Image (cartoon, helix red, strand yellow):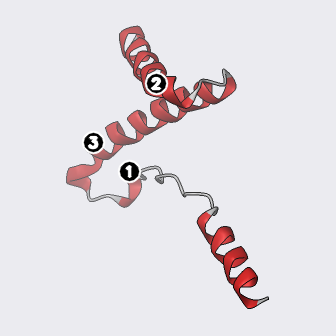
Amino acid sequence: MKPLLFIAAVALLASAPAHSQTLVDPSKVAPEYREAAEKRRAEQLRQRECALKADLEKVLPRDRTAFLTHCLETMAAGQ
């Protein structure tokens, strides 16, 4: 019975969701790096928006990179 419990515990630990990268907070960065932090945060928000679009459109994992690249290029061209 103990090996079964061990296997179940390992399975639960292995299936824990991965944490996404946290957003940069420009207010917590030294003043000389604040502009770069603001740019990084804007890029992170664009990436999250494209990832959400991919999720909503149910893009297959094999096509996700191409979808995200196209989405980010489209957003950059629109600005």
Q: Secondary structure at mark 3?
A: helix
Marked residue nearer the N-terminal end (2 or 3): 3
Q: Residue furthest left?
A: 32
For the residues labelled 1 and 3, the Cα–Cα distance comes to 8 Å
Q: Please name the amino acid that badge 2 sits on.
A: Leu
45 is higher (above) or lower (below) than 15: above
Which quadrant, please, contains the C terminus? top left
The answer to which of marks 1 and 3 sits earlier in the sequence is: 1
The residue at the point 27 percent across, 42 percent down is 35
Kindly indicate the quadrant of the structure image that contains residue 69: top left
Q: Between residues 36 and 20, which one lies in front from this camera angle?
A: 20
Foreground tag (2 vs 3):
2
User: Disc 1 marks which amino acid?
Assistant: Pro
Q: Residue at x 34, y 41 (%)?
A: 40
Give how far across and how far down residue 23 sits, in percent.
46, 49
Would you place residue 13 above or below residue 42 in this image?
Answer: below
The residue that mark 3 highlights is: 35
User: Relative to 20, is 32 on the left or the right?
Assistant: left
Residue projecting furthest to the bottom: 2
Question: What distance separates the C-alpha of mark 1 from that of mark 2?
Answer: 25 Å
Instruction: Determine the image quadrant of residue 38.
Output: top left
- Vertical comparison of 78 with 35: above or below: above
Q: Residues within 10 Å of mark 2 (few under 14, many from 20)?
A: many
As shown in the figure, which amino acid type bears the numbered disc 3? Glu
Instruction: Report the residue marked by disc 1.
Output: 26
Residue 68: mark: 2
Figure check: 38 above or below 22? above
Q: Secondary structure at mark 2?
A: helix
Closer to us: 34 or 46: 46
The answer to whether the residue labelled 1 contacts the one labelled 2, judged by CB atoms less than 8 Å apart, is no
Q: Which mark is residue 60?
A: none
In whole angstroms, how far apart are the C-alphas of marks 2 and 3? 25 Å
